[in-house]
Image (spheres, grey):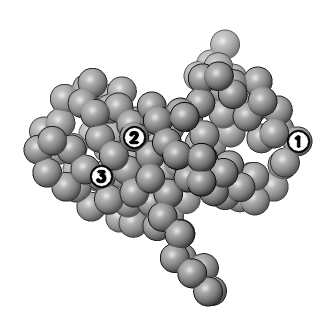
Amino acid sequence: MDSENRRKFTRIPFRTEVQVEFDEGILLVKRLKDLSLGGAFLICAQPAIPVGSECVLQIELIGPATLLRIKLDAQVVRLDKDGIAVAFTETDLDSLVHLRHLIEVSAGDTHTTDAEFLANLLELPS
């Protein structure tokens, strides 16, 4: 089974600026490779951040009438030449709802994303 089939969550490409706060400082990332309910891949030059490091992602969603910010606690799970993979570890309910809605709209498949959300509810960051 390839890694695409083992993934628990639908991944979407998403282009926005992400602020990543580490103990070592703040990293501004201009682009995500993908985003899911369980994590994200941040495209950036490889910073000196070890796997296992805790961080906080702030993803800005700009709409016609408002600016929403999704805040997610995460852990670095992989580094490679293209960037950083993080797994989400905790978030508030509002951020989780906004993230879920963003993925549903972008994926265009509410049935699949609803099923993923319900099947993995206990494993989602809370």
Q: How far apart are marks 3 and 1 (CA)?
A: 31 Å
Q: Which mark is residue 15?
A: none
Asked if residue 61 is positioned above or below residue 22 in the image, the reply reads below
User: Badge 1: how crowded within 10 Å, few (<14), some, or many (20+)?
Assistant: few
- Number of marks in picture: 3
Residue 35, horizontal then vertical, whole percent = 55, 47
**Numbered badge on residue 73:** 2
Instruction: Answer left or right for 67 relative to 4.
Output: left
The image quarter in which residue 47 lies: top left
| Residue hosting label 1 | 111
Crowding at label 3, few (<14), some or many (≥20) Cα neighbours within 10 Å?
many
Q: Mark 3 = which residue?
A: 20
Dots 3, 1 in contact, CB < 8 A? no
Question: Mark 2 and mark 3 in contact (Cβ < 8 Å)?
Answer: no
Q: In this view, does 100 lie above or below 85?
A: below
Q: Is residue 42 visible?
A: yes
Point out residue 56 in the picture as x, y percentages from the top left corner: 33, 46
Discs 1, 2 touching: Cβ within 8 Å: no
> What type is the residue that disc 3 sits on?
Val
Q: Which residue is drawn at 32% across and 32% down?
A: 76
Identify the residue at image location x=30%, y=52%: 20
| Type of amino acid under label 2 | Asp
For the residue marked with disc 1, what is the amino acid?
A: His
**Image quadrant containing the N terminus:** top right
